[in-house]
Amino acid sequence: MNLTIVGCSGSFPGPDSPASCYLVVADGFRLLLDLGNGALGSVQRYASLDAIDAVCLSHLHADHCLDMCSYNVVRTYHPSGPMPRIPVHGPAGTLERLDRAAGADTGTTMAAAFDFVTLSPGRFEIGPFVVTAEHMNHPVETFGFRLEHSGRAIAYSADTGPTDALVSLAAGADVLLCEASFNDGPDLPADLHLTAGQAGEHAARAGVGLLVLTHLVPWNSKERTLAEAGARYSGPLALSSPGLVL
Ligand SMILES: [Zn+2]
Ligand SMILES: [Zn+2]
C-alpha cells in the first residue's frame, strides 16, 4: 500500500495544506480517504482525476467532504464526456447533504456521477482493500477506517475524541494516521477531537508501528503538537505534511 498525504490541515485549509484528504493506492487501485475543502486541486499532483477508483468519506463535516461538489463538476462536465460512476462510501445522508451543498435547486443530483454506498460498522472490501469501519467519538456520525492489503494495515482516526474503538481499530497497524487537533489545555470540549497527547496515548495502547499526526489545525504549533504526542508515545512518530508518501 502506498499512502500519500494530500491534505492534512485540521478543520479548515491552511496556507500550506488543504483540509483532510489521503490517497491510498494498491494494485493500481486509487482510493481517496476524505475529500475536504481545497483538496481537489492538490489531488491532481498525485493522480489524474479520471483515475480515482473510489472515495471513502469519514463524515459530513465540510473539511472532510466538501470538495466532492467540485469533483462532481469534473466527472460530469469533462469535455471527453461524463466519466463512469465510481463508488462513494459515506455515512447515511451523504448524497442528500452533498446535493444540497452543490445546489440541488438546479434539479441535478450527484447520484448521476457517483454510486453512493452507505457505511456501517464492520468489514467490507473496496477494490483490493479489506476495510474495517468503526464509529468514532465525534458530534456527527463519523467512521474511522482500517485498510488492509498484502499483510499490511493502515488505520485512520478521522475526527474523534477519545475512544477505545480507535485503539481496537488500529491494533497492531503498521501506520496510524491519527488526528491531533488540540494541544493540552484547560476547558477543552469533550467528545470532539484528540489532543496530541491523547493521540500518542491511543497509538501506544494500539501498539502501532508508526504514528503520523494529522488534522493539524493551522493556529497550533506543530513543534508543540509533536512534543506532546512524543511525551505519551515512545515509538516512531511523524507529523503529516502534504506530499508525504508512506
Ligand atoms: Zn475535521
Ligand atoms: Zn469533524
Image (cartoon, grey):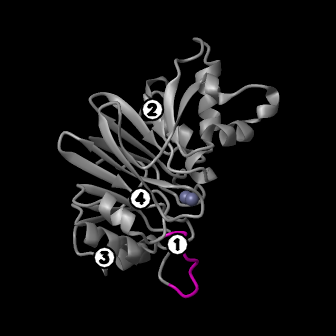
SS of the residue at dot 4? loop
Q: CA distance from mark 2 to mark 3?
A: 34 Å
Residue numbers of the magenta segment: 185-193
Screen quadrant of the N terminus: top left
SS of the residue at dot 3? helix
**Residue nearer the viewer, 122 or 227:** 122
Which label is found at residue 52? none
Residue at the disc numbered 1: 220
- In the image, 205: left or right of 219? left
Rendering coords of residue 130 (x, y %): 30, 40
Label 1 CB-ligand 1 distance < 8 A: no
At 65% across and 36% down in the image, what residue appears? 69
Asked if the stretch drawn in magenta spans residue 190, the answer is: yes
Q: CA distance from mark 2 to mark 1?
A: 32 Å
Asked if the stretch drawn in magenta spans residue 137, the answer is: no
Q: Earlier in the sequence, mark 1 or mark 4?
A: 4
**Residue nearer the viewer, 167 or 82:** 167
Residue at the disc numbered 4: 157
Crowd tier of the residue under label 1, counting other residues whose Cα lies within 10 Å: few below 14, some 14–19, many 20 or above: few
At label 1, which amino acid type do we have? Asn
Crowd tier of the residue under label 4, counting other residues whose Cα lies within 10 Å: few below 14, some 14–19, many 20 or above: many
- Seen in the picture, residue 49 relative to 6 is either above or below; the reply is above
Rendering coords of residue 227 (x, y %): 36, 78
Crowd tier of the residue under label 2, counting other residues whose Cα lies within 10 Å: few below 14, some 14–19, many 20 or above: some
- In the image, 91: left or right of 214? right
Q: CA distance from mark 3 to mark 4?
A: 18 Å
Residue at the disc numbered 2: 54
Label 1 with label 4: CB-CB less than 8 Å = no
Q: Earlier in the sequence, mark 1 or mark 3?
A: 1
Residue at the disc numbered 3: 230
